[in-house]
Image (cartoon, coloured by chain):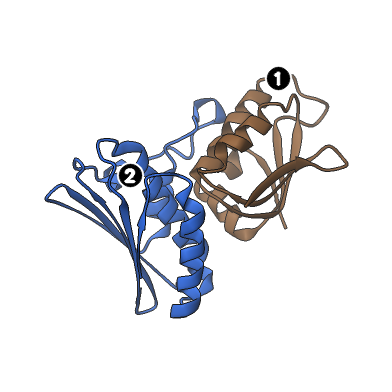
């Protein structure tokens, strides 16, 4: 089960499992993001390379836009240690602003 | 434990359920779950995506081994395709040079303790082991 939505602050919230079966739906949602954005991953349990592709594609598109103050691209917050390991193995820790739980 | 999987990404959810049940029944360390789930998904997705000349089901088999678990995926009536030969990814490249894709097998090779590919009689089988570190 994978859920993606906005919270009351306008941040994206992802929960559940972002796998290859869910990546197209996640990408469709993220394609509507028009500026710098924070993604709350506190309830995201799992991500595979298909999910990483969604984040990378969106981040590249947003980073090509003008910065909004100090914010630029995607910021990944409340990342659990399993997913943080995946980000580190993938080199995403050098591409994204990431904060762990 | 052995199950047959249809060649559809929709099967990933079933794999998660089957794996969870097997971990519980066989007493496999739950700390291995994420790595096992990820390796199965990436290798399964590879088979479904690249072995398009067949509509055969894919076999998934799991067995407890000393200190961990051994998992194999077998695809039938396909050409040779060894994913372990495609595990290179430049994870140090700057953002402008990164493109979505190409990380799946790379991550598998990072996660497993061993991995082995066999091909005979048009059967493509990949087996990996993950152990508690």
Q: In the displayed structure, does residue B38 sit left or right of residue A83?
A: left
Residue in front for this viewpoint, B114 or B36? B36
Q: Which residue in the protein does label 1 denote?
A: A65
Chain letter belonging to callout 1: A
Q: Which residue in the protein does label 2 denote?
A: B47
> Is B13 drawn above or below residue B79 in the view shown?
below
Q: Quadrant of residue A26?
A: top right
Q: Colour of chain B?
A: blue
Disc 1 and disc 2 in contact, CB within 8 angstroms: no
Q: Quadrant of residue A60?
A: top right
* Quarter of the image where the N terminus of chain B is located: bottom left
> Is A13 drawn above or below residue A35 in the view shown?
below
Residue in front for this viewpoint, A98 or B19? B19
User: Crowdedness of circle 1 by 10 Å Cα count: few (<14), some, many (20+)?
Assistant: few
Q: What's the residue at 47%, 52% (across, down)?
A: B12
Image x and y of residue B86, in percent: 31, 41
> Is A53 drawn above or below residue B105 in the view shown?
above
């Amino acid at each position: 089960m994978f859920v993606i939505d906005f919270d009351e602050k306008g941040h994206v919230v992802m929960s559940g499992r972002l796998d290859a079966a869910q990546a197209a739906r996640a990408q469709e949602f993220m394609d509507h993001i028009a500026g710098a954005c924070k993604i709350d991953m506190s309830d995201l349990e799992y991500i595979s390379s298909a999910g990483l592709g969604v984040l990378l594609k969106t981040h590249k598109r947003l980073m090509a836009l003008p910065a909004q103050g100090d914010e630029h691209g995607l910021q990944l917050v409340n990342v659990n240690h399993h997913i943080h390991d995946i980000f580190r193995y993938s080199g995403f820790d050098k591409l994204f602003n990431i904060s762990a739980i | 434990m052995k199950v047959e999987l249809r060649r559809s990404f929709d099967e990933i959810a079933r794999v998660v359920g089957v794996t969870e049940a097997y971990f519980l029944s066989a007493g496999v360390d739950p700390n291995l779950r994420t790595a096992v789930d990820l390796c199965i998904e990436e290798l399964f997705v590879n088979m479904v995506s690249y072995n398009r000349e067949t509509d055969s089901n894919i076999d998934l088999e799991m067995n407890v081994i000393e200190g961990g678990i051994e998992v194999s995926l077998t695809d039938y009536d396909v050409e040779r395709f060894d994913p372990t030969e495609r595990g290179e990814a430049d994870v140090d490249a700057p953002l402008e040079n990164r493109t979505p894709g190409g990380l799946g097998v790379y991550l598998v090779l990072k996660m497993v303790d061993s991995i082995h590919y066999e091909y005979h009689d048009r059967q493509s089988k990949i087996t990996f082991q993950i152990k508690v570190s």
